[in-house]
Amino acid sequence: MPALPSWADEDTPVFVISIAAQIAGMHAQTLRSYDRIGLVSPGRASGGGRRYSVRDIALLREVQRLSQEDGVNLAGIKRIIELEREVGALTDRIAEVTEELARWRAAAEQGGASRSDRLPARRTQSVVVWQPGPRRRE
């Protein structure tokens, strides 16, 4: 893998299609085909040319592995990629909720805050009609 510029990370689209194809060990036309069917969606340069990131190239290699070694068809590979992205998003959300829960627990253990400060208010659009009951005589 060629060295990335100092300003780029693994998600920065920097490789033109010919270089990305060479790194991934594929033909450029295969990359175009994968882009058309939505397997790998590279970034675009201002002129419209495809630009691949390191993450895109890793995904291309995974597509190739699933296809050649495991015999998965392209529709199956697309679904696998979608499910992996969904699992990643859910894992991130679980981490966020776990951190938030830890903050709530820490605040509750400190004790000084009122109950309304510690528990999030549930927002609802429900309408509740209140009707007074019979008055009690004391």
Image (cartoon, helix red, strand yellow):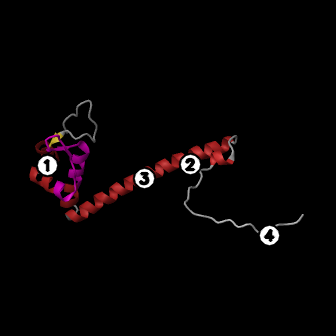
Viewer-proximal residue, 1 or 74? 74
User: Label 3 neighbourhood size at 10 Å, few (<14), some (14-19), many (20+)?
Assistant: few
Q: Are marks 4 and 3 in contact (CB under 8 Å)?
A: no
Q: Is residue 29 above or below residue 44?
A: below
Q: Nearer the viewer, residue 48 or 72?
A: 48
Kindly report the distance in space between the C-alpha atoms of the residues bearing marks 3 and 1.
31 Å
Q: Which residue is mark 2?
A: 101
Residue 5 at least partly seen: yes
Between label 1 and label 2, give the one nearer the viewer. Answer: 2
**Mark linked to residue 91:** 3
Q: Residues within 10 Å of mark 4 (few under 14, many from 20)?
A: few
Element type at mark 1: loop
| Residue for badge 1 | 25
Question: Which type of secondary structure does the marked residue at label 2 adopt?
Answer: helix
**Quadrant of the image containing the C terminus:** bottom right
The reply, left or right, for residue 86 in relation to residue 108 is left
Q: Compute the Cα span from label 4 to label 3.
A: 53 Å
> For the residues marked 2 and 3, what is the alpha-carbon distance in whole angstroms?
15 Å
Side (left or right) of 49 relative to 79: left
Tell me the CA gap for discs 4 and 1: 82 Å
Q: Residue at x 68, y 48 (%)?
A: 115
What type is the residue that disc 4 sits on?
Pro
* Picture residue at 22% right of the left edge, 51% below the top: 41
| In the image, residue 134 above or below residue 104 | below
Residue 110's quadrant in the figure?
Answer: top right
Instruction: Report the number of numbered marks.
Output: 4
